[in-house]
Amino acid sequence: MRLTKNHFYITAWALIFNFSCSQPSNTNVTSTADSLKIAAVVVPDSAAFKLTVDGKQVGLFVLKNKNNTSVAITNYGGRLVSLLVPDNKGKLTDVILGYDSLKSYQKPKEPYFGAIIGRYGNRIAKGKFSIDGKAYQLDVNDGVNTLHGGFKGFYSRVFTPKQISANELQLTYTSADGEGGYPGHLSVKVTYTLTDDNALKIAYEATTDKPTIVNLTNHAYFNLNGAGSKTITDNLLQINADRFTPVDTTLIPTGKLQNVKSTPFDFITSKAIGTDIGKADEQLKNGKGYDHNFVLNKADIKTIAATVKSTVTGIVMDVYTQEPGLQFYSGNFLTGESHDGKHGAAYGYRSALCLETQHFPDSPNEPSFPSTLLKPNQTYKTTTIYKFSAK
Ligand code: GLA
């Protein structure tokens, strides 16, 4: 195997990371971080991610491919920190929102930037569900409901990192029986792979020792005009979904599947996100914009589930998934009040969008929705791909 410069940086960092777990004051880390910064232009400084959290070592890992596309990931919450892809002039553009240091990821009410979400992505009504007649109560952290796992979901857990190669990182975490109210020890493995065709592949796996519920996703906030750009309402979106799951005022699905035809939710043909977002519509009112689960026409890793395009950079993102649903969230809760985004950016209202591949919200309480039950001796396995190109 040819040892490239990038490979050297990754390998050097991996070695130093391992070494620094037992030698926290190792000064070499700073020089490695500087090398990475030079190598990848705007990859955040890894020294700002080097911290012990819950007694575990946190760090920043950078995956790179032969096109200079790179993704920086921290094992704190398994978060995607930066994703640099070439625009239509070949200029690298960071397309996801995030912070320059771990400290900002730890602040209260942080909006899950780039995080792995578990045990259950999106909402569970009143935090209640039952398995085999036994009732469980989860943390209630979003009004009357549970959102994204609860008060200390996977977004704030430290995963054990294992750099498999220059373009692959494996993260594991074992969630204790009863953590956040969920039954069973849940062993989770998430593998991030950056391929040479500029696709970021996220493979999720989980096993349990008691019947439980699982719904894992990633909460990356994208702006294909470049992270820190003002809005995503000019991004073009197409979603391969004829139906969506309408919600009540607390964003819990009503249980119905509604046809998108003649509604603002029709993204069958590509349109600017802002086209209908301001329309008088009960569902848009409930979501304060788009914050809805789309029922994908095909849960198939070879079929495009959704495509986003920037008319500014020409960057195109195709989403592929094995999941039956896709939460399209138009960044309605972003306020831009603090300037602690990367390079001092204030991430304002609708300055990013999320396309969270998932099982439907509140499935444990909706028998008509695809099941999220996981039993011992079964393996939860699902893959999502975000693939980038430029036109
Ligand atoms: C998801 C939810 C939204 C919101 C964001 C995070 O997309 O559906 O309602 O909570 O996460 O702010």
Image (cartoon, rainbow, N blue to C red):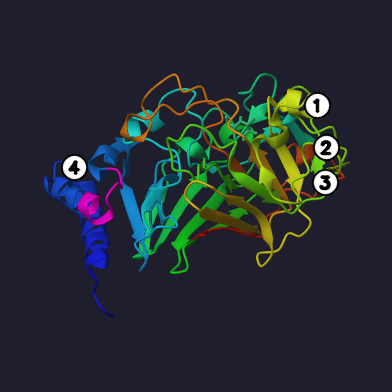
User: Mark 1 sits on what residue?
Assistant: 281
Query: Residues at badges 1 and 2 in contact (C-beta under 8 Å)?
Result: yes
Write the residue at 38% across / 31% down. 341
Name the disc covering residue 24, or none: 4
Amino acid type at circle 1 is: Asp
Tell me which numbered mark, 4 or 2, is placed earlier along the sequence: 4
- Dot 4: what SS? loop
Front of the two marks 2 and 3:
2
Of 276 and 143, the residue lying toward us: 276
Query: What is the span of residues highlighted in magenta in the rendered image?
Result: 36-44
Residue 183: % across, % down: 65, 40
Write the residue at 23% across / 49% down. 37
Amino acid type at circle 4 is: Pro
Front of the two marks 3 and 4:
3
**Mark pair 2, 3: CA separation:** 10 Å
**Mark pair 3, 4: CA separation:** 52 Å
Q: Is residue 203 above or below residue 133?
A: below
Q: Is residue 305 left or right of residue 54?
A: right
